Image (tube, rainbow, N blue to C red):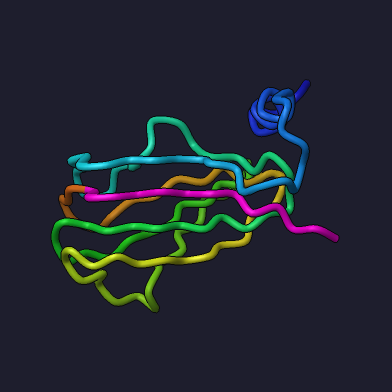
Amino acid sequence: MTSEAEQRRQKARSSDTPPYAQPIEQASLQSAAKEADTDFLDEDMVAVFPPSMLRILVQLSVAAKCHVMVDNGSTEVTLVLNSGANLAAGCLYLFDVLVAAEDLVNLQADGAVTVDRLIVQEIPIVV
């Protein structure tokens, strides 16, 4: 039985883009209203070429903490960005988060926000 992460990874790898040729767009949002503690994305992200780094560019309409939710299939953990401090309203932030093969990833805020801009790119790690 193949995991959800592995099924999605195989589908993404079937594209004509060779691995490591360029960053892989994982998600993009603009002007999206989100309630507190709800996923920003309708579908969790999964690394296409794990291990990888997710480069997260985000701007929120109001000051709030931004969380990366990582589920490895048995446990979900909350990673708080910006050293646990609120992201300032209307300011652009850039974060890098390492992810493993089994990780399903999403983002949330601790308050109701409008996601002014969100871009997530996967940067494969060449070993």
* Relative depth, front residue between 99 and 32: 32
Q: Residue at x 69, y 44 (%)?
A: 102
* Relative depth, front residue between 82 and 17: 17
Q: Residue at x 71, y 33 (%)?
A: 17
* Residue 64 drawn at (x, y percent): 21, 64
Please determine whether, in this image, residue 82 is positioned above or below residue 11.
below
* Residue 41 drawn at (x, y percent): 38, 37
Q: Residue at x 66, y 28 (%)?
A: 12
The kind of secondary structure the magenta stretch mainly shows is: strand
> Is 41 displayed left or right of 23 in the figure?
left
On whether residue 124 falls in the magenta region, the answer is yes
On whether residue 72 falls in the magenta region, the answer is no
* Residue 30 drawn at (x, y percent): 26, 42
* Relative depth, front residue between 71 and 75: 71
* Relative depth, front residue between 65 and 15: 15
Please determine whether, in this image, residue 46 is positioned above or below residue 75.
above
Q: Quadrant of residue 1?
A: top right
Q: Quadrant of residue 125?
A: bottom right
Can the viewer see residue 109 in this picture? yes
* Residue 37 drawn at (x, y percent): 28, 49
Total numbered labels: 0
Please determine whether, in this image, residue 83 is positioned above or below residue 66.
below
> Is 65 displayed left or right of 18 in the figure?
left
> Is 36 displayed left or right of 27 in the figure?
left
| Quadrant in which the C terminus is drawn | bottom right
Please determine whether, in this image, residue 18 is positioned above or below residue 21.
above
Can the viewer see residue 10 in this picture? no
> Is 116 displayed left or right of 12 in the figure?
left
Q: Residue at x 17, y 48 (%)?
A: 114
Q: Which residues are drawn in magenta?
A: 115-127
